[in-house]
Amino acid sequence: MYDWANSAFATTVMAGFFPIFFKEFWNYGVNPNLSTYRLALANSVASAVVALLAPVLGAIADKGSAKKKFLIFFAYLGVLMTASLFLVQKGQWIYAFFIYIMGIIGFSGANVFYDSLLPSVAGRDKIDYISSLGFSVGYLGGGILFLINVLMTQMPHLFGLPDPATAVRFSFLSVALWWGLFTVITIFWVPEDKAPLITTSRESVVIAGFRQLGDTFRRIRNLKVVFLFLLAYWLYIDGVDTIIRMAVDYGLSLGFESSDLIKALLIVQFVGFPAALVFGKLGEKWSVRKSIYLAIAIYMGVTVYGTMMTQKTEFYVLAVVIGCVQGGIQALSRSYYSRLIPQNQAAEYYGFYNMLGKFAAILGPVLMGWVGLAVRHLLMPPSPTPEQQIAIGQLASRWSIGSVLLLFIMGAVLFYFVDEEKGRQQAVYLANG
């Protein structure tokens, strides 16, 4: 149910309304490629902060049996920041930039500890399905609220609101309420394994956490299986996260209407609900490894096709395809990693997992933004006509999305060398001391 709760932020804020509002309202009158760069920079700064904090916090949480305490802190930091977006006025992109960064820190920080609870609630034989079930329910919950939010913007008077812009701002408030309310279910009903180490003070918990972090960092450098998987994951999940965060901005740069892009996001949500469940079963019955490869291959095809599309119907087709694999690759990667790590250090190892995921989210958006600006700079003549500006701007956007393909290719190659059986053996050895 925490997936149900926080997916509202991922859908309505990160993927949906924030990129549109940031470009058209908070960056009103700014060059589209510059606003894309600012959005990419916001995602990257937030990801860098979470990446640096995640392993340290995970180690401390393991030693103090404090996974849920940290989850609560970061979740409600995200809730507060999301509600604060309501207060940002037109043209105030700097305030939106800062609040959005803090919101992502809350969202991503909480996920470190949420992910680490997975081994506590699912046995080895069901962990792939339970992980997929979480993502599936998240797509449904996020999709339901997003649908309500879309209706608010399209028919604001029906909800007692004066205009679509006000409706978007109230949508941010609704996300904060949804996220904060449903997190209560996780707080009261999800169990947490207690650490065997009993400490007498908060200071000793922190010191023990830092010591464990140092020990694990020294070990992880020599754990070839874990290291290779994390490196592969870092690359291919970068492509996934970049497409999630930048797809709407890319569509706007090509000249598509924001209403068309919102419909595509709704398609992703409601296709993703059953598709994530199917991928969970696919991982159980077929192979988790092969299922991840299948998802990467589909994403590569999506990226290539995305550089060539010209019609909004093509965007809808890509939305259906992405919905079929997005939750699957996220869920199966999370559960696959659980096989390679000692369960009594889950929060810390998931801290490294999320750290690399967030460092990946630094690379992808910045790569897109840099490639787009570089192509525009190289091709734009000294005194371009309006038609040339539009054409070159769209070409720059196509090159920027195409750059993501490289990340999927490198991730797939490295994943090939991950030896799961050897990883299982190492995890058991480490868990037993």
Image: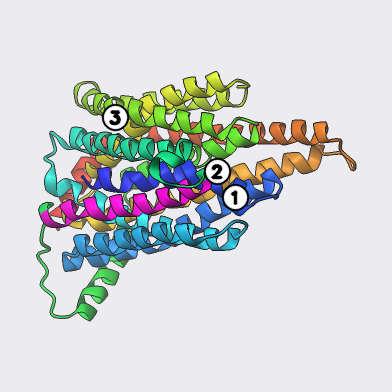
Q: CA–CA distance between discs 1 and 3?
A: 31 Å
Q: Which residue is mark 1?
A: 25
Prevailing secondary structure class for the magenta stretch in the rendered image: helix
Give the crowd class for mark 2: few <14, some 14-19, many >=20 residues within 10 Å.
many
Q: Name the front one of labels 2 and 1.
A: 1
Query: At label 1, which amino acid type do we have?
Result: Phe
Instruction: Please tell me which residue is depicted at 34% across the width and 54% down the height of the picture.
Output: 176
Q: Name the front one of labels 2 and 3.
A: 2
Q: Name the front one of labels 1 and 3.
A: 1
Q: Which residue is mark 2?
A: 20
- Across and down, in percent, residue 91 comes to 62, 57
Left-right relation of 309 to 425: right
Query: At label 2, which amino acid type do we have?
Result: Ile
Residue 273's mark? 3
Instruction: Please tell me which residue is depicted at 57% across the width and 54% down the height of the picture.
Output: 41
Pick whichever of labels 1 and 3 is earlier in the sequence: 1
Q: Nearer the viewer, residue 136 or 366?
A: 136
Pick whichever of labels 2 and 1 is earlier in the sequence: 2
Query: At label 3, which amino acid type do we have?
Result: Phe
Instruction: Please tell me which residue is depicted at 48% across the width and 33% down the height of the picture.
Output: 262
Magenta span contains residue 169? yes
Residue 127's mark? none
Secondary element at image label 3: helix
**Is the Cβ of the residue at disc 1 closer than 8 Å to that at disc 3?**
no
Give the crowd class for mark 3: few <14, some 14-19, many >=20 residues within 10 Å.
many
- Across and down, in percent, residue 126 comes to 14, 34
Q: Quadrant of the image for the N terminus?
A: top left
Read off the magenta span. 165-188
**Is the Cβ of the residue at disc 2 closer than 8 Å to that at disc 1?**
yes
Among all residues in the image, which is located at the extreme right?
A: 383
Magenta span contains residue 224? no
- Across and down, in percent, residue 21 comes to 55, 47
